[in-house]
Amino acid sequence: RITNELLANVGLFVLLALGLNIVVGLAGILDLGYVAFFAVGGYATAILTSPNRSDSWPDWMPQSHWFVALIVVILFAILSGLFIGAPVIRMRGDYLAIVTLGFGEIIRLLFLSDWLGGYTGGAQGVTNIPGVDLGFVEIKGTDPRAVFYLVAVFCAIAIYVSWRLENSRLGRAWMAIREDESVAEAMGINTVNAKLMAFVVGAVLASFSGAIFAAKVGSVF
């Protein structure tokens, strides 16, 4: 049981690292606020699936199934990737690192703030998050082996996507930008679009990890 719990946690960080590898490893973008995407995935899943309804939540917002929430999480991850990536797309080096670190702090403070407290619970967070219902079994934190299997499936998907992207036209563009952005731009690579795609893909993979973490722990703070 302890081994399965350890492997499940390791798998969550591996999934997070696979997304970070897209941003830093392939595209060479030093994103120090990357963990914000993990928080977006966790909180979005919690808000959409938890039966603990806040008075601030709209009446039309249903208590969603985990996989339905995952689709919304992907959309939020894409938007947050564009939101963080667009303002810093022309920056390089230390300036890029400092600004992305600032965005990571902004996301953290927003989730803790009273302004979004009606949705995120502020310092109290969101509790009573259900597990992942597969129909024949519900995966929750009390069953570490099932959580590990779920994490392993998502890690396999992330590894396959990373491998395919690395050998694609987009992946070669990322690596060209990583080596020398000015030369890559001179060779006709649209560096703005390529960098934004790196932010978006990395954000989606990190949000997967956050979504599984929320279902595993049953609460986010």
Image: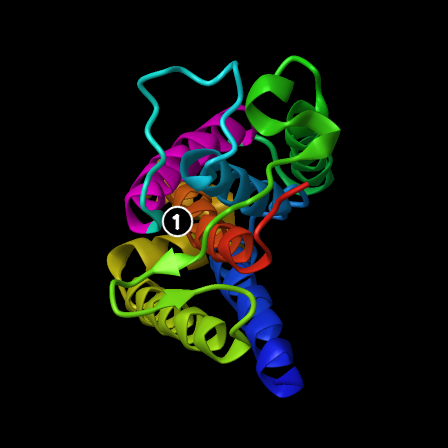
Secondary structure mostly seen in magenta is helix
Count of residue discs: 1
Q: Quadrant of the C terminus?
A: top right
Q: Quadrant of the N terminus?
A: bottom right
The magenta stretch spans residue 54: no
Residue situated in front as seen by the camera: 40 or 195: 40
Does 121 sit above or below residue 31?
A: above
Expressed as whole percent of the image width and height from the top left, the position of residue 65 reads 31, 45
Residue at figure coordinates x 61%, y 70% from the top left: 9
The magenta stretch spans residue 71: yes
Does 77 sit above or below residue 161?
A: above
Expressed as whole percent of the image width and height from the top left, the position of residue 19 reads 48, 57
Residue 166: image quadrant is: bottom left
Q: Is residue 14 visible?
A: yes
Residue 165: image quadrant is: bottom left
Residue at figure coordinates x 47%, y 39% from the top left: 50
